[in-house]
Image (cartoon, grey):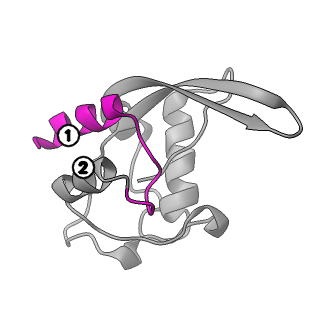
Amino acid sequence: SCAGHVNAGDDIVETTIREMEEELGGSGNMKGRYTLEDVKNSRVFTVTSAIEGETEKHGKYTCREYQDVFILKWKADLPMQSHDFAPMVKEEVSGFEIISGKELISKLRQRDDELVPRSEQYIDALAKVFGC
């Protein structure tokens, strides 16, 4: 998976393609594999999120956002392997692991510290997509 923030005025599909290239393969086997149309047709759900926190500089805050989730089918003749991915922005990627949807849902529900925490609404929607 990969993630990013859409700036005001930016197109979500174009941002999704950019994030995929940056985090999954701007320089590897992913480069040029998916089109804007592929991404546009792969949106599976949108959830809202609100996170509260506090920083020394800005004080208390609430960050509200929409999370659009896209699931793309692998476009290759051979099975997916971790060496297919080569991020352009290595600082944003800690590694690659190929797991099933069922295992992903299980890790999210267990709050696996290797994954970005997600809301129950997000996990439930993703589980429904994977049939878990």
Classify residue 105 as left or right of residue 53.
left
| Disc 1 target residue | 127
Q: Mark 2 falls on what kind of element?
A: helix
| Disc 2 target residue | 105
- Which amino acid lies under the numbered mark 2 shown in the image of this protein? Ile
Q: Is residue 68 visible?
A: yes
Does the residue at mark 1 contact the one at mark 2 (Cβ under 8 Å)? Answer: yes
Classify residue 66 as left or right of residue 41.
right
The one of 8 and 65 positioned closer to us in this rendering:
65
Residues drawn in magenta: 112-132
Return the disc, 1 or 2, that comes first in the chain's sequence. Answer: 2
Queried whether the magenta region covers residue 17, the answer comes back as no
Q: Residue at x 57, y 27 (%)?
A: 11
Q: Mark 1 falls on what kind of element?
A: helix
Q: Check residue 10 in the rendering and tell me which mark sits there, or answer none.
A: none
The quarter of the picture where the C terminus appears is: top left
Count residues near mark 1 (Cα–Cα under 10 Å), then give few for <14, some for 14-19, many for 20+. some
